[in-house]
Amino acid sequence: MAQISATEQPHMKQIDLTTLNLQQLGTLKQQLDQELDLFQESLTSLKIAQQKFQTSNESLECFDSSIEGKEIMVPLTGSMYVPGKLVDTSNVIIDIGTKYYVEKDIPQARSYFQRKTKFVTEQMEKIQYLGLEKSKIRDAIVEIIQLKINQQQPSQA
């Protein structure tokens, strides 16, 4: 799949958009629209992941020795819970992805969630930058399409 970028890259060739015909410009615009949609979907997924990591980190705030022995409801699925008792409040089991779980102490778990939140945030910033770049190119293509359509109208009249 061809890449479209406003910044010059050594492995890419530069094309003057004004030399393309309307059909080529339309195809290019459609490709950019698809890429922008993909970026938006990726941002939405990353935002959900970011919120989950932040929520998990915040939930660690209530873990201390004073809640040891208290009864809680343990989630088995998104809608099924079973009663349980807190036995060890200095360690937690965290989901590290693809159904793998690891036992960590509270400071390690906080550090893990903070690292993951930071990583996801950095990825979101990269995607937002790329999306902005692609959006500028798309706007330039739309302008050129409009210019070419306006140039064709007087010749047809």
Image (cartoon, rainbow, N blue to C red):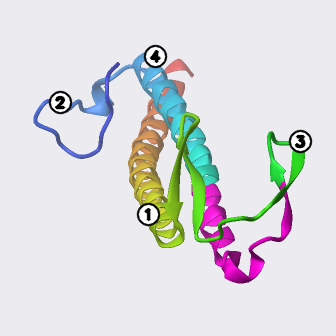
Which mark is first along the chain, 2 or 4? 2
Q: Secondary structure at mark 2?
A: loop
Mark 1 to mark 3: distance in Å?
31 Å
**Local secondary structure at mark 1:** helix
Q: CA distance from mark 1 to mark 2?
A: 31 Å
Which of 61 and 90 lies nearest the eye of the viewer?
90
Residue type pointed to by label 3: Met
Marks 4/3: CA–CA distance: 54 Å
Quarter of the image for residue 140 reads top left
The quadrant of the rendering that contains the C terminus is: top right
Q: Quadrant of residue 72?
A: bottom right
Q: Does dot 3 land on a helix, a strand or a loop?
A: loop
Q: Which residue is mark 2?
A: 12
Which residue ends up furthest to the bottom in the rendered image? 66
Query: Which quadrant is home to the N terminus?
Result: top left
| Image height of 87 relative to 33, above or below | below
Residue type marked 2: Met
Residue 120 point in image, percent of width and height: 47, 55
- Residue where numbered disc 3 is placed: 80
* For the residues bearing labels 1 and 3, Cβ distance under 8 angstroms: no
Determine which residue is flagged by label 4: 23
Identify the mark at residue 118; answer none if there is no mark.
Answer: 1
Q: Amino acid at mark 1?
A: Lys
Residue 99 sits in quarter: top right
Lower position in the chain sequence, tag 1 or tag 2: 2
